Image (tube, rainbow, N blue to C red):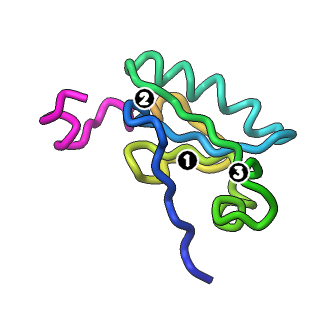
Amino acid sequence: MSSPRIPSPHDRDARVLYLTREGCHLCEEALPVVRAEADRAGTVVEVRDIDAEGEGSALQRDWDHDVPVVIVDGAVHARYRVDAADLRGALARRPLWRRLLRR
């Protein structure tokens, strides 16, 4: 089995990409935590439904059993459940390229 491809946000200002699907109770619980911590950090969350591209899409194949998935700065931060303090710490660390570009 190959490792899943990590998608990039479409919004260039989004440091957080949140993969979800309709009817996922863990997704519904985690999203408010993710949004609150992103707001605290002054960044954007891009929410993407893995089923939106249709049955058998690459996003659905790669992440079908892992939602919700929180991707911060291009790295998987959490799956299934989100700890606010851990996410806060991840958002406090900024990659060098973001510091240089002041983004």
| Secondary structure of the residue carrying numbered label 3 | loop
List the residue tagged with mark 2. Answer: 88
Q: Residue at x 48, y 47 (%)?
A: 77
Q: Amino acid at mark 3?
A: Ile
Q: Quadrant of residue 34?
A: top right
Front in this rendered view, residue 93 or 97: 97
Quarter-of-image position of residue 63: bottom right
In the figure, is residue 102 to the left or right of 56? Answer: left
SS class, disc 2: helix
Is residue 91 on the magenta stretch?
Answer: yes
Residue placed under numbered mark 1 in the picture: 78
Disc 1 residue type (three-letter): Ala
User: Which badge, 2 or 3, is on the more N-terminal residue?
Assistant: 3
Q: Is 92 situated left or right of 31 in this image?
A: left
Q: What crowding class fits label 3: few (fewer than 14 Cα within 10 Å), some (14-19), or many (20 or more)?
A: many
Which span is picked out in magenta? 88-103
Q: Residues within 10 Å of mark 2 (few under 14, many from 20)?
A: some
Query: Residue 95 is drawn in which quadrant?
Result: top left
